[in-house]
Amino acid sequence: MSTRRIVATLALCLASLVAIPAHAAAPKRFDICWTIYAGWMPWGFAQTQGIVDKWAAKYGIEIKVTQLNDYIESINQYTAGQFDGCTMTNMDALTVPAAGGIDSTALITGSYSNGNDGIVLKGEGKRLADIKGQDVHLVQFSVSHYLLARGLDSVGLRERDIKVVNTSDADIVGAFAAPEVQAAVAWNPQLATIAATAGASRVFDSSQVPGEIIDLLVVNTAKLKANPELGKALTGAWFEVMALMQAHDANALEAMAQAAGTSLADYQAQLQTTALMYTPAEALAFVSSPQLGQTMQRVAEFSFDKGLLGEGARSADAVGVELADGAVNGDAQNTKLRFDASFLHQAVSGQL
């Protein structure tokens, strides 16, 4: 073989090798985590039924949705960068990733607690005022703590009138079963179990502060901006499941109940106290409402009072929260939590 032919052959081989990556590059992969809660069960269903895979494939990416067992730990792992997105409430989104400097976007505003979070006391006929002097078990600095503060305020009490005992969501049911424990604050499904204890009284719940405890899917803002297809795929998958739930699809609801470790009847009861936004239009109306800004300001004030906005925070305005209209609550130079309505607009107009 001539030298010229050898060179030409080598050049052809090299050109082929260079061309391979352009056609065979692995799709971008993203990891999302979630924990057991009535309003987040759709994520597990969307993963196991291939709905997430279908929407991810539509946009040429891969998305893995993983269930974790401990709620606070899931948020910590997201904040540490181990996940690209995570289910959490509005308050926890502000006080953990945002206050920790991780710019995060509330991509899916899926529901709000309308009785799914509550305060329970042992003893029939108890009233919230009876909590005075009690040790109250709850996940400290979570929405349970926020709900407790809202409840105490409604009966003229303050946190100094009780003692908070930090208890993980995984341990709260077992803790309440102990004879010496007389008071607890929890969210479903743990709340339903605690409230079913013989002689227990549910004395306050989130239906008395509607729209304040909001259930979100939060995604890393930088990842979302660089990969808008992630937002499109997750939004599309979510509302596909919402359509099934709105139609009372028995198979979907039964699967979610089983995944939650409860009966279909119990899960449907939990959904009665979960204000799900079944359509993109409903979610868009909620995030566009002036009430959201008011709620986030109230949450920021509670969080600052508890020292949850970071060591350097000098006021409740330390962390900027961008609302759907672009206005910012708090420090616009330190905006770390954003309510993005752009994907909802696309879903409403049928562009996903």
Image (cartoon, rainbow, N blue to C red):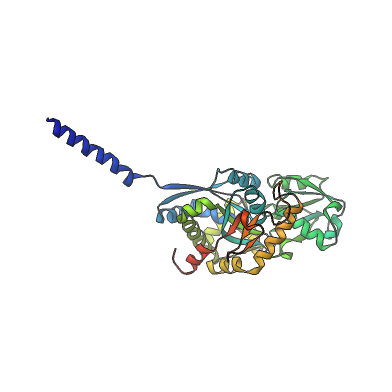
Name the quadrant of the N terminus: top left
Q: 286 or 277, which lies in front? A: 286
Picture coordinates of residue 217, whole percent (x, y): 57, 55
- Vertical order, 23 against 9 (above or below): below
Q: What residue is rendered at 73% in x and 52% in y?
A: 314
> Where in the figure is residue 146, as x and y percent of width and height?
74, 56
| Residue 103 rendering spot, x and y as whole percentages | 58, 51
Q: Nearer the viewer, residue 320 or 345?
A: 320
Q: Where is residue 41 in the image (x, y as percent from the top left)?
A: 58, 55
Residue 49 visible (yes or no): no
- At 81% from the left and 47% from the top, the residue drawn is 181
In screen coordinates, is 163 left or right of 288? right
Image label count: 0
Quadrant location, the C terminus = bottom left
Q: Quadrant of residue 297?
A: bottom right
Q: Is residue 91 in view? A: yes
Q: Quadrant of residue 270?
A: bottom right
Residue furthest to the front:
333
Q: In this orientation, which residue lies closer to the viewer: 29 or 192?
A: 29
With 157 as the anchor, is 246 left or right in this view?
A: left
* Above or below: residue 19 compared with residue 196: above
